[in-house]
């Protein structure tokens, strides 16, 4: 919805006034915009046009739902082309056009502003300006790749386009995206005044003699720029998938050689191709739709009133306890961090202080280390947490230790507050049962490092009440996390699925497959780091303990035919620990990394035929998807999208594959079954597909619509 507002003296404002909390450029808005632009341009009484918003933000982008539903490039073009043409008419219509931005202008919103002759923003520290499409495997599709470099130069525009960074208002002004910053109550006056003072405004690129600022594409620096940027893109690794950034670079190179209209036509062509690509659809579904649904607390029981945590108790001042305490303190929450002794707890607090100091030196903190640290109190006396609003324990991963700690907690805190465990594997029911009022116990499984990993797996046990769940979710919202709610069970969702990945890698090591081959296969699949190297970083003794705790009753199909436990146990016995201790699967001489020579001796090749990289990749990916389907069958997760979000955010599963469920859609259920049956014959029953997949294949069903 767009309203017209008469600002007097022939100046008319088009006020974006969408029905939701933000303005997006959906089809209905675009159609209205096209019509209003033509009306205003054709009206001789109108001498200037102002684009603005009735909301805190200006316009925050296109409608991804509509783009996601498009299945052909023709359909995509039909959505964007009328809008693109209207922008062009607007900037060449002979009337001054001013963007009066109340707050953020992102994606299509910024592209709209770039088609105006003047961009004025308010002095709003929360506002962000940028073209973040690339983070979802897309690129700007409404002239952004052509107007931005023509405005600020190729070298300045390319990183903004290819990395999708969002700038605050001051930075946006200093980089030339914004012309003027004013107080909010002066916004419309300033816009009107500029329009009145510049009745014949035009765009720089439509003036005679215009050249792109900086250097032209066809120049020494231009060629150097493209060669260097291509090389950087390719250096990121074989499986690195950034089709959006590649397309942007192509469009910059081809489009800037030509006039604006030809450049925009090239942009539209690439944009439409990206929108219908499987990679972008996967990224949009998981990183946009899935993450936003999780952040909006879709499954929060809404009959429970909203809550806030003012005082958080953290038990355990180790890696995770410190991370959780710090994360909360940064958000202004008062934290008490307890450990087995006051000395231990104090050491943990000092470690946080050192970390904050380093972060401050790198300019990564908004407040001073002292301001943050002031929120954290360390100790060993449980009376200090008597008035806590929520407790998270992060002590050793042992049932007996956790039980004892939770009982001490339950004895002092208010009976109605959530008591959470950060266990990564142990079913919550195992320590909830002997606590009075087990309905207040749940799992909050944070990931390491806590300040950078946004996922929290929220484990709802059979006894967990709606109130406990709702209050825990409110707390995660306070922390800015992305919660995925799962049901209780050994390893929940994430540890259960990720363990199959590391187990399979260890199986391959045990079969004598060279670690570089295993690493290459996972990197080619799109993981940032090879899984054999990752195991060395995790450390092999820890991996051995994880495998042991995930063994369960020993009957789990995920372990059928696996030699992973024996392999890791043997490596540990042989003194192989991991990278920290000088060597694990690899040795780490000062100049790099070589496979430990003992591997060949202790794990000779089982197969006379060399194992192909494609088979290794299939084993590493299929084993995860199979276990994920079993968690769905077991009721651990409610829907595939939750699992896809959890694996992409939780262990860096390649976003362009969408996630462990989307991967089966990509391969096709029938083909996936055929692959798994062959793997089951050769490597064991853990590859046997669950019945659900046969049913899906028969009915031609998928986990996700598109
Ligand atoms: P850690 O060994 O770094 O820290 C554990 C802390 O608990 C230590 O400071 C220890 O002194 C303290 N502690 C032990 N017994 C205690 C007691 N009785 N009372 C009070 N404090 C006690 O371990 P961590 O890596 O921080 O892991 C903690 C928990 O988080 C475990 O359950 C682990 O499975 C889980 N987790 C770890 C990670 C990870 O990547 N490290 C990720 C997710 C979850």
Image (spheres, rainbow, N blue to C red):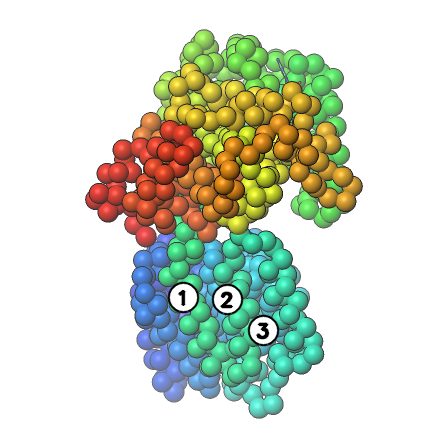
Local packing at callout 1 (Cα closer than 10 Å; few below 14, some 14-19, many 20+) is: some
Ligand 1 lies under 8 Å from the Cβ of mark 3: no
Q: Quadrant of the N terminus?
A: bottom left
Kind of element beneath mark 1: helix
Q: Which mark is residue 204?
A: none
Label located before the other in sequence (3 or 1): 3
Q: Residue at x 59, y 21 (%)?
A: 569
Residue 558 in the image: state x and y as whole percent: 41, 27
- The local crowd at label 3, few if under 14, some if 14 to 19, many if 20 or more residues have their Cα within 10 Å, is many
Residue 319 pos. (x, y %): 64, 28
Left/right of residue 556 with respect to residue 693 in the rendered view: right
Residue 306 drawn above or below residue 228: above
Residue 158 placement: quadrant: bottom right
Apparent side of residue 205 relative to residue 655 in the rendered image (left or right): right
Disc nearest the viewer among 3 and 1 = 1
Q: Marks 3/2: CA distance?
A: 15 Å
- Label 1 near label 3: C-beta < 8 Å? no
Residue drawn at x 57%, y 12% is 401
Q: Which mark is residue 149?
A: 3
Distance between the Cα atoms at labels 3 and 1? 22 Å
Label 2 sits on residue:
247
Badge 2: few (under 14), some or many (20 or more) residues near its Cα, within 10 Å? Answer: many
Please tell me which of labels 3 and 2 falls first in the chain.
3
Give x and y (percent) for residue 182. Answer: 59, 65
What's the residue at 67%, 78% (across, down)?
A: 215
Disc count in the image? 3
Q: Secondary structure at mark 3?
A: helix
Q: Residue at x 60, y 39 (%)?
A: 515
Which residue is disc 1 drawn over? 273
Residue nearer the viewer, 650 or 443? 650
Q: Quadrant of residue 318?
A: top right
């Amino acid at each position: 919805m767009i309203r017209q507002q008469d600002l007097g003296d022939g100046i008319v404002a088009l006020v974006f006034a969408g029905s939701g909390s933000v303005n997006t450029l959906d089809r209905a808005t675009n159609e209205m915009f096209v019509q209003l632009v033509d009306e205003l341009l054709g009206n001789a009484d109108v001498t200037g046009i102002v684009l603005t918003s009735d909301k805190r933000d200006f316009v925050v982008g296109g409608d991804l739902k509509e783009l996601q539903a498009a299945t052909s490039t023709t359909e995509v073009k039909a959505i964007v082309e009328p809008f693109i043409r209207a922008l062009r008419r607007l900037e060449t219509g002979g009337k001054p056009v001013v963007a009066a931005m109340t707050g953020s202008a992102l994606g299509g919103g910024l592209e709209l502003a770039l088609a105006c002759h003047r961009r004025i923003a308010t002095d709003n520290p929360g506002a962000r300006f940028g073209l973040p499409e690339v983070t979802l495997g897309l690129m700007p599709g409404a002239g952004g790749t052509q107007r931005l470099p023509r405005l600020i130069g190729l070298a300045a525009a390319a990183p903004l386009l290819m990395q999708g960074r969002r700038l605050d208002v001051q930075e946006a002004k200093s980089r030339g995206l914004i012309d003027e910053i004013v107080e909010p109550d002066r916004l419309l006056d300033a816009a009107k005044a500029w329009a009145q003072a510049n009745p014949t405004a035009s765009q720089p690129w439509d003036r005679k003699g215009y050249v792109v600022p900086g250097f032209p594409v066809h120049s020494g620096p231009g060629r150097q720029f493209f060669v260097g940027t291509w090389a950087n893109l390719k250096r990121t690794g074989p499986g690195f998938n950034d089709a959006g950034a590649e397309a942007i670079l192509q469009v910059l190179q081809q489009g800037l050689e030509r006039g604006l209209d030809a450049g925009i036509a090239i942009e539209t062509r690439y944009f439409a191709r990206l929108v219908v690509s499987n990679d972008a659809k996967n990224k949009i579904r998981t990183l946009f739709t899935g993450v936003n649904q999780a952040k909006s607390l879709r499954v929060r029981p809404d009959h429970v009133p909203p809550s806030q945590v003012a005082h958080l108790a953290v038990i355990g001042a180790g890696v995770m306890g410190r991370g959780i305490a710090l994360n909360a303190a940064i958000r202004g929450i008062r934290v008490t961090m307890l450990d087995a002794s006051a000395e231990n707890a104090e050491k943990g607090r000092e470690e946080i202080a050192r970390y904050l100091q380093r972060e401050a030196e790198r300019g990564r903190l908004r407040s001073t280390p002292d301001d943050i640290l002031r929120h954290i109190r360390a100790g060993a006396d449980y009376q200090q947490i008597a008035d806590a609003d929520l407790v998270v324990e992060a002590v050793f991963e042992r049932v007996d230790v956790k039980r004892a700690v939770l009982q001490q907690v339950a004895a002092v805190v208010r009976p109605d507050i959530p008591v959470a465990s950060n266990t990564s594997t142990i079913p919550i029911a195992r320590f909830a049962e002997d606590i009075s009022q087990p309905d207040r116990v749940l799992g909050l499984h944070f990931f390491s490092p806590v300040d950078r990993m946004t996922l929290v797996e929220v484990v709802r046990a059979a006894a967990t009440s709606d109130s406990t769940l709702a209050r825990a979710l409110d707390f995660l919202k306070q922390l800015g996390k992305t919660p995925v709610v799962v049901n209780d069970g050994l390893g929940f969702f994430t540890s259960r699925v990720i363990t199959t990945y590391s187990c399979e890698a260890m199986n391959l090591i045990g079969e004598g497959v060279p670690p570089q081959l295993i690493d290459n296969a996972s990197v080619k699949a799109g993981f940032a780091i090879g899984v054999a190297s990752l195991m060395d970083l995790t450390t092999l003794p820890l991996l051995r303990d994880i495998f042991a705790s995930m063994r369960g009753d020993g009957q789990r199909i995920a372990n059928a035919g696996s030699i992973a436990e024996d392999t890791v146990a043997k490596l540990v016995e042989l003194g192989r620990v991991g990278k920290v201790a000088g060597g694990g699967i690899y040795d780490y001489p000062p100049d790099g990394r070589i496979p430990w020579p003992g591997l060949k001796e202790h794990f000779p090749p089982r197969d006379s035929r060399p194992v192909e990289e494609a088979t290794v990749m299939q084993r590493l990916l299929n084993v995860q998807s199979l276990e994920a389907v079993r968690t769905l069958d077991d009721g651990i997760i409610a829907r595939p999208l939750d699992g896809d979000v959890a694996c992409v955010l939780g262990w860096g599963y390649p976003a362009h594959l969408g996630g462990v469920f989307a991967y089966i859609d990509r391969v096709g259920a029938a083909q996936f079954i055929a692959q798994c049956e062959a793997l089951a014959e050769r490597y064991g029953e853990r590859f046997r597909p669950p019945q659900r997949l046969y049913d899906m294949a028969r009915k031609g069903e998928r986990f996700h619509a598109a």
